Image (spheres, rainbow, N blue to C red):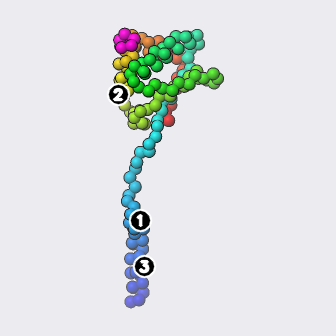
Amino acid sequence: MRKLLITAAAFGLATTMGVTPAMADGHEEAKPEMRDQTWYRINMIKFNPGNQQRIGEILDMFEAADKAAGVDGPFVMHMDTGAWDMAVFFRMEHGIKQMGWRSTPEGDKWDAAFNEMVGGEDEARKICTEFQSSVADEQTHSG
């Protein structure tokens, strides 16, 4: 009988030990939570040689569109050495989930401001195509 009581007590202790400490400390099951992080899309750009003046003019137009739209423009780093001529850091205002969106409210405002500034959607498309034709190589990263 004594052996049976000791076995029952040991079994009872073992089954409650796994649950009791967490309950005693008031812990609940952990819920995943997004950290507050700032995400950027980084474009590394190598330009075709010989068109720096026009590239500068177009970049000035892009910056003016940022201001006209009331959006934060990217941080632009001009490189003096290395494989790339420029690194452009675009803050992803809506976090990593923004990568799945077709457009953003800020991007739509920028498009509207740029279109108005240059005389319409067709002219804006021409300027963006001209800029893109000046790009020899480009890589996009996020982080």
Range of residues picked out in magenta: 116-122
Single out the mark in the foreground, 3 or 2. 2
Instruction: Identify the disc placed on residue 105.
Output: 2
Residue 37 visible, this orientation: yes
Q: Quick one: which residue is furthest to the right in this view?
A: 81
Residue on which the image places disc 3: 10
Q: Position of residue 82 (x, y in %)?
A: 63, 24
Residue type at mark 1: give it: Asp
Residue on which the image places disc 1: 25
Q: Quick one: which residue is furthest to the bottom in this view?
A: 1
95 up-or-down from 11: above or below: above
Q: Quadrant of residue 93?
A: top left
**Nearest the eye: 11 or 54:** 54
User: How far separated are the C-alphas under marks 1 and 2?
Assistant: 45 Å
Q: Position of residue 129 (x, y in %)?
A: 44, 14
Q: Is residue 16 magenta?
A: no
